[in-house]
Amino acid sequence: MSSNKVVHALYNDDEVVLEAVKKVKAANHHIEEVFCPFPVHGLDKAMGLAPTRMAITSFLYGITGLSIAIWLTWYTMIGNWPQDIGGKPSFSWAENMPAFVPIMFELTVFFAAHLMVITFYMRSRIWPFKKAENPDPRTTDDHFLMEVPVHGNEEELTNLLKETGAVEINIVDKH
Amino acid sequence: MYQFSSKLKIFSIALFILGLLGTGWSFYNGSTATIEDAKTAIASKHDDGHHGNKNVDSHKETKHADSDQHEDVHAQGDEHAEHVLHQMKNRPWSAFYVALLFFLGVTLLVLAFYAAQRVAQAGWSIVLFRVMEAITANLLPVSIIMVIVIVLTGMHFNHLFTWMGEGVFDKASENYDPIVAGKAWWLNVPGWMIRGIIYLIGWNAYRWFIRKNSIAEDTATSIKIYKRNYNVSVIFLVFFMATESMAAWDWIMGLDPHWFSTLFGWYVLATLLVSALTTIAFVTIYLRSKGYLPKVNDSHIHDLAKFMFGFSVFWTYLWFAQFMLIWYADMPEETTYFLMRFNEYKTLFLSMVVMNFAFPVLLLLNSDFKSRPWFVIIGGVVILAGHYIDLFIMIMPGTVGESWGFGIPELSATFLFLGIFIYTVFSAFAKADPVAKGNPFLHESEHFHYYNIEHHSAGEENHH
């Protein structure tokens, strides 16, 4: 029914789309999604999206990597097969710690970076061979698309979006 | 225009006088120290050793080593006492020298950071230009004091540098040191004095030129002065990169003339650079809270804190790179440096890593914290203290060895230079327009907003 109808407003400039989002929000309309060819700074705030929790996950992944590195260096160099490191056969993890710092650093970065990317893909519901979700291929080139649901206020919305500088406005049925 | 408040002026003069009195007292104490004082100091130190050993009484070797030491002291008591006496005489000089190099280095690195901003044609930092210029006003007085110290040291008024000792280069002398003698082409008194004075003249010449022409930019009608300032800053940075490393060898690494590290110049640079950025942040936050920097917003503070965070990590990287290679290779001629620091300065050596790395990194990791003046101040105080300690344990082991302390000589030298710093910096800030209004990037700087943070204090703090 009418609740499945959405307006697709296309813009050709990131500054314009940012201003448009602010105006549409100010007029108390819900914005379903904005599709951009590149990240636009401040767009998430203008749309009223909750701040990302990616930084927190990154910190936790880093701690995980650090712990695994500590365990790994202990197990391989001290616990399972004690090694003479740098001519100092102390067989103690703490006393050989300087030699393990590069490994601890690298695994912290490795875990934080890779797991963060994987988390991002999962949260964005992107995986290999997935069909693209963007409604218009031009949003991967030089256009920005704002999707606003219609609740029987088609005309009002269209006028508002035209005022904000949209270069094209389509009303489509969303399946 | 800013007016240097009389309250702050009196405070800085009081600090200076307090520092001067304390320094005078320590120099008097040092010069009148006798061999008896040295023996008392050794005896009291030995008692401490006994207390320490009680805890490991079961360890036979420790006991044995201790009794050996006893015999040593009795047999060569006088020689050892004379050694300690030399260290006691060095202490007021060393305390003064640490504070001098700290303030000279921080001021110099503010100048270098400022030059880098000009060369990079950075847009964000223009509203901070006059703050940085004001801080570099401290360069001239500390350079004059440094020249005096260089001349007095060269004339053997102190014995901070063992390689300047008598007969070190003389094969016939009993003080002959073949390793140091092999470095005589670089480590010789005339060369050392001339080089030091050249560095200082070069740095001060740039500071004098750029300050004059930065003010000339304010009323300039063409871009010519701005371009010339750019060119001169490029030349200065090249000169600075070479002379900063050489100054670090001459003035700090030369205190341990047997030892060397190829990354020492950068390591000193990292220590001074992170302190310099903290200093810029402190002066900026202070002046902004008084309402004299209305154009400075939270994003500028955020950027300074990002630099503090980043260069704290950079310092740790260099500190650790220097340490780990020496630790791993385990060659006696290299490890002596860390052995001395780890045995005699253990608490400072270890707490320094927490203060310069763990604490600022964890505190300033959060993006929001970096734009809050109070967090920047808490982090900055720890950073400044940590890097003072870093410089302290670069210098003290080579000059006073195990006879170090932290008391009136060290505190009063710091007060003395802090007094000079506050006086020169704030009177220089009062002498020019607080906004570098002739800079073509000023507009960009005024509207600088890091997208990820909210500006808080812009409204509330300007009403003071």
Image (tube, coloured by chain):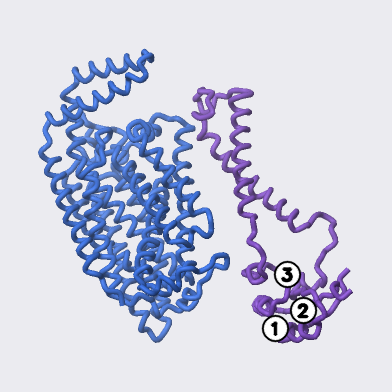
For marks 2 and 3 on the same chain, the one whose residue lies earlier in the sequence: 2
Q: Kindly identify which chain the residue marked by label 3 belongs to.
A: A
- Identify residue for label 3: A37
Binning the other alpha carbons within 10 Å of mark 1 as few (below 14), some (14 to 19) or many (20 upward) gives some
Q: Kindly identify which chain the residue marked by label 2 belongs to.
A: A
Q: How far apart are the alpha carbons under marks 1 and 3? A: 19 Å
| Figure check: B159 above or below A143 | above
| Figure check: B389 above or below A96 | below
Residues at marks 2 and 1 touching, judged by CB atoms closer than 8 Å: yes
The residue tagged with tag 2: helix, strand or loop? strand
Tell me residue B189's x, y (percent).
23, 46
Q: Nearer the viewer, residue B420 or B179?
A: B420
The residue tagged with tag 3: helix, strand or loop? loop
- Identify residue for label 1: A164
- Identify residue for label 2: A9
Residues at marks 2 and 3 touching, judged by CB atoms closer than 8 Å: no
Snapshot quadrant of residue B78:
top left
Q: Colour of chain B?
A: blue
Q: Mark 2, mark 3: which one is toward the viewer?
A: 2
The three-letter amino acid code for the residue at tag 3 is Pro
Q: Kindly identify which chain the residue marked by label 1 belongs to.
A: A
For the point 81% across and 77% down, the residue is A151
Quadrant containing the N terminus of chain B in the rendered view: bottom left
Binning the other alpha carbons within 10 Å of mark 3 as few (below 14), some (14 to 19) or many (20 upward) gives some
For the point 38% across and 72% down, the residue is B293
Tell me residue B73's x, y (percent).
21, 20
The residue tagged with tag 1: helix, strand or loop? loop
